[in-house]
Image (cartoon, grey):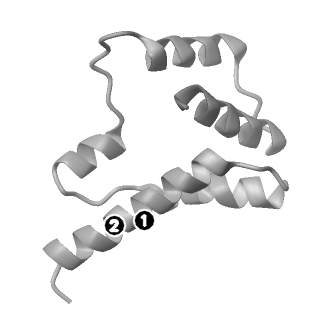
Amino acid sequence: MILQLLRECAEIAIASGYRPNDDQLSGYRAQLTEHGSAYTTSMLRDIERAGRTEVDHVLGDLLKRAQSNRLQTPLLEATYAHLQSYEVQRKTKYERP
């Protein structure tokens, strides 16, 4: 799944005029699939400390670019929805109105 999500993001970048470097993509694939890797994303670290994420700034922007280029991004959409749900729950639990 993570490699498919990476492909979706790469397709968005390409369609938006920002072709990723093949060597960088290869490095990302290796990092994301390394057995026993301790790598975590900043958004995961945000969630682990019950903090705000940059979901709208990062994934929201990617989705807008995908939509404007008429790309299908089912995993990115599911990831975005999941993180939006987290943000609503976090805000309800930890922030005062």
* Residue type highlighted by circle 2: Glu
Across and down, in percent, residue 73 comes to 69, 48
Q: Is residue 76 left or right of residue 89?
A: right
Q: Residue at x 16, y 74 (%)?
A: 93
Near-viewer residue (24 or 84): 84
Residue 85 higher or lower than 4, as above or below: below
Does residue 34 sit above or below 62 in this rendering?
A: above
Task: Pinpoint residue 32: horizontal percent, then vertical percent.
Answer: 46, 20
Mark 2 = which residue? 87
Say if 88 sits above or below 61 in the image. Answer: below
Could you tell me the amino acid type at mark 1?
Gln
Give the residue at x 79% y 36%: 14
Report how far apart the C-alphas of labels 2 and 1 lie in the structure. Answer: 5 Å
Point out which mark residue 84 bears: 1
Q: Are marks 2 and 1 in contact (CB under 8 Å)?
A: yes
Residue 88: image quadrant is bottom left
